[in-house]
Image (spheres, rainbow, N blue to C red):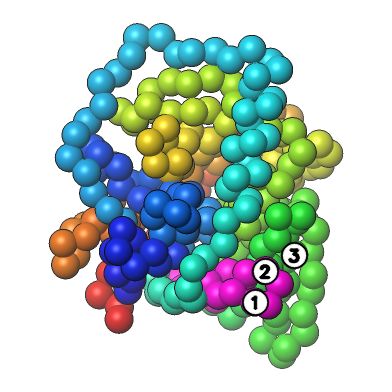
Amino acid sequence: MCISCGTSRNFCLWHCVQNKRPVARVSRPCQYSIIFALSFCLFALAAFAQKQTETSQPTILPPEQAAREGKALADEILSQRPAQNTTNTGVMTVRAHDTSKKIPVRFEVFNTATNWCSRYVADAMDVRVLHDASGNQYRVTAPEGKVRELSGNQATKTPFAGSDFSLADLGLEFFHWPEQHLTKKEMKRSRSCKVLESINPAPTAGSYSRVVSWIDNESDGIVMAQAYDARGKLLKDFIPKKIKKVEGQWQLEEMEIDNDQTDSSTRVDFDLNAK
């Protein structure tokens, strides 16, 4: 497992803010460890003590300001890369149609000469996402060694190891869409957040038309996200669920993605005792 993100600048994905709620974190490298990739693998959390005070009304941004600030926020997120290589393990529990399946999973994050890569291995599926500010590359390696390359829309339609996560979810594909709007600022899960709406320029059947992310004002962490299908109907909810204090540091223990249309869900339990 990783060391404190405050001291090691390790690559972590989820961050617990002041009221001890976990959020997906994309932090500034000069201040904290680099966080990137709602790649849903996590490596370190810090904890704070205070709960924010709720405001009565959200602040709505004018359209021009919303587009300008939304694009700037997405660009900032995409510019980050991990400070060091990391590996973690866990178990995915996939629930659908009154059945439940547990799948061991391994997550890796490493730098390359030109960009950085996140790797996900589960149930004979080996996925690499090559991250670059200009666009992601998705590579799926079959057990016999054959490699398939997928586009962003193809990755959205391809589930990871039979779970509710698509390959595009692992790559934060929606931050690469050209249309980004910081629509308003409001409270979510007791946190003061910026609401970023990412709009797919060419949605197709089975892909997302837009993704709405609630991003914590203080930590730039994702408190919650919702994905909508090509018809504009709510499809998925992404929520960090449970944290645990390990050796003085708060770490994400459990996160979940719910499919609102199939009534299925996938929970990831991270192995906090892995070394």
- Numbered range of the magenta stretch: 102-122
**Whole-Å distance between the Cαs marked 1 and 2?**
5 Å
Q: In the picture provided, is 55 more to the left or to the right than 35?
A: left
Query: Residue 112's mark?
Result: 1
Q: Position of residue 64 (x, y in %)?
A: 71, 17
Q: Amino acid at mark 3?
A: Gln
- Residue ID at (59%, 80%): 124
Q: Main secondary structure of the magenta part?
A: strand
Q: Amino acid at mark 1?
A: Thr
* Residue identifier under label 3: 137
Q: Answer whether labels 1 and 2 touch (C-beta < 8 Å).
A: yes
Q: In the picture provided, is 244 more to the left or to the right than 151?
A: left
Note whether residue 241 is visible: no
Q: Position of residue 66 (x, y in %)?
A: 64, 22
Query: Residue 161's mark?
Result: none
Q: Answer whether labels 2 and 3 touch (C-beta < 8 Å).
A: no
Residue furthest out toward the front: 30
Q: In the picture provided, is 51 more to the left or to the right than 164?
A: left
Q: Is residue 140 magenta?
A: no
- Residue ID at (49%, 76%): 85
Q: Quick one: SS at disc 1?
A: loop
Q: Quadrant of the N terminus?
A: bottom left
Note whether residue 220 is visible: yes
* Residue identifier under label 2: 115
Q: Residues within 10 Å of mark 2 (few under 14, many from 20)?
A: few
Q: Is residue 102 above or below residue 212?
A: below
- Residue ID at (77%, 38%): 178
**Whole-Å distance between the Cαs marked 2 and 3?**
11 Å
Q: Position of residue 267 (x, y in %)?
A: 41, 56
